[in-house]
Amino acid sequence: MEHQCIIILDFGGQYSHLIARRVREAGVYCLVKSYKTPPRELAAMRPSGIILTGGPNSVYEESSPHCSKEVLELGVPVLGICYGAQLMAYLLGGKVATAPVGEYGRIRLTADAAQSLPLPCGEFTVWMSHKDYISEPPDGFIVTAKTNDCPTAAMANFEKNLYAVQFHPEVQHTEHGQEILEAFLKGICACRGDWEMKGYVEQTIQALREKIGDRKVICAMSGGVDSTVAAVMVHKAVGKQLTNIFVDHGLMRKNEGDEVERIATQTFDMNFIRVNAADIYFEKLKGVEEPERKRRIIGEEFIRVFEREAEKIGKVGFLVQGTIYPDVIESGSGDSAVIKSHHNVGALPDVVDFDEIVEPLRMLFKDEVRRAGLELGIPEELVWRQPFPGPGLGVRILGEVTPEKADTLREADAIFREELEAYYFPNGRDPALSPYPLDAVPSQYFAALTNMRSVGVMGDFRTYSSAIALRAVNTNDFMTADFVQIPYEVLSKVSSRIVNEVPGVNRVLYDITPKPPATIEME
């Protein structure tokens, strides 16, 4: 059966990979590519359709990103969204200008044309974010929707299969948003909507088996979801040719190192080397308080420890990395703003003797990685494990990192996670099974140890002890986040348990700062 794929041309919009997620949720495979991708390269991929994303620029500015007009002449359906809609109009001879009234947030839209595809007819709410508008559609286009302040909220050239919407169908605030995308994908592009994780996992395992052949493979297994899923996928392909090295820096969460070892050795019978290097790390971190210096020390020491173990194995054919698709996009492979550089295993390529890097998850989003993990038989408790930074508790302990502080934080964090999971996820760790609305369920939650000590009273005695800060946020993309309004009775129970069960803690705080201005992590 012919492979179907939608190409998403990225013009720097903040929702570019949200569009990709929505397309895949519809059962259609897609790739995010730079707007600079030559039309001949796009044509060679034989896409079923193309989506032009939003972006922060004005199409009439000299420095604004433009794709070639040939992209609109490849003979496949094209959907322009926001900036993409304006660019379609501009390239085809229409007019785009600064709008008399910009539209931001929820706006009522009316789709009243006889043919309003891919929109449903009638009035509904959409999410707008634009200061420019299409003042005059190109020849051959008809206006299919409008708002009070936007005369061309959507347009279409049915003969050439070109469609444009000024609003964002990919965000949850747009009514019928997924329905509109699926009308384009399945009704206009004729995509079957049969892309699913089981087939993807099977195909990837087979491709890995053919690529690796009989050569050795090495993997730096951090214990997180990405590296574990990548390791298991490669293990399913080549078995004992893979050796996993797990560097336990003493900054893991409660019982986490043991769980990683158990899953690797007992559940999957992998070649697994555990290096207990906590003493080395704590010695290196002694007296260090500056967050970036802590990160650098932890990262560099990981490389040194891994290098020593890798030398014992000798030359290998491949190094496995748990790179996922947002890592690729965020590191600037597209044209969205570079948010952060991702180095999944630090500078390992410089210190390990290998031929090639293998990245089996490179085309998957985080939620898809979790689904792949379930397909591979990885236990649910690991698949739905909370995100955890590479430096571990080292960046959730404010100030100097010591073994005693790490033990204190481990216990407090375990209590907080246990109580939140009991409240929000009584039916299993999958957020979709929560009895509460998804926008009220925490996406990430953890405890941090502040470097503040304060006076308290326990029994008849004065205490001068540490304060634990709790953090729980809800987010779709981890680029912006808001704090979760945890019920007071849950917070009260967590606070009571922590001060009673964790020695050296007499105060519990709840961080209610969104991102931005804060980050999700404390350091």
Image: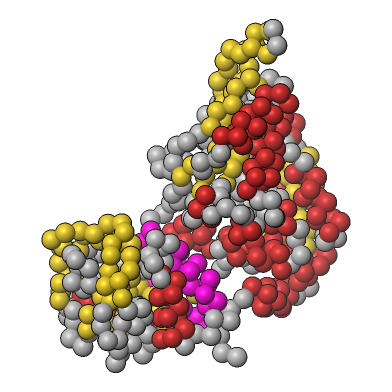
Q: Quadrant of residue 239?
A: bottom right
Q: How is the image coloured?
A: secondary structure
Residue 344, position as x, y percentages in the image: 60, 53
Question: Residue, x 23% and y 72% (percent of image)?
Answer: 146
Q: Is residue 281 above or below residue 29?
A: above
Residue 467, position as x, y percentages in the image: 59, 23
Residue 171, position as x, y percentages in the image: 41, 62
User: Range of the magenta residues?
Assistant: 4-28
Question: Residue, x 51% and y 43% (percent of image)?
Answer: 484
Report whether 404 appears left or right of 37. right
Observer-nearest of 45 and 109 = 109
Residue 284 visible, this orientation? no
Observer-nearest of 397 and 422 = 422
Q: Is residue 179 above or below residue 469?
A: below
Report whether 428 appears left or right of 126. right
Q: Is residue 429 above or below residue 362?
A: above
Q: Quadrant of the N terminus?
A: bottom right
Question: Residue, x 50% and y 80% (percent of image)?
Answer: 5
Residue 214 visible, this orientation? yes
User: For residue 16: magenta?
Assistant: yes
Observer-nearest of 112 and 499 = 112
Question: Residue, x 56% and y 47% (percent of image)?
Answer: 442
Observer-nearest of 235 and 509 = 509
Q: Quadrant of residue 431?
A: bottom right
Q: How many labels were placed on the picture?
A: 0
User: For residue 216: magenta?
Assistant: no
Report whether 446 appears left or right of 233. left
Q: Is residue 339 above or below residue 276?
A: below
Q: Residue furthest left?
A: 100
Residue 88, position as x, y percentages in the image: 26, 77
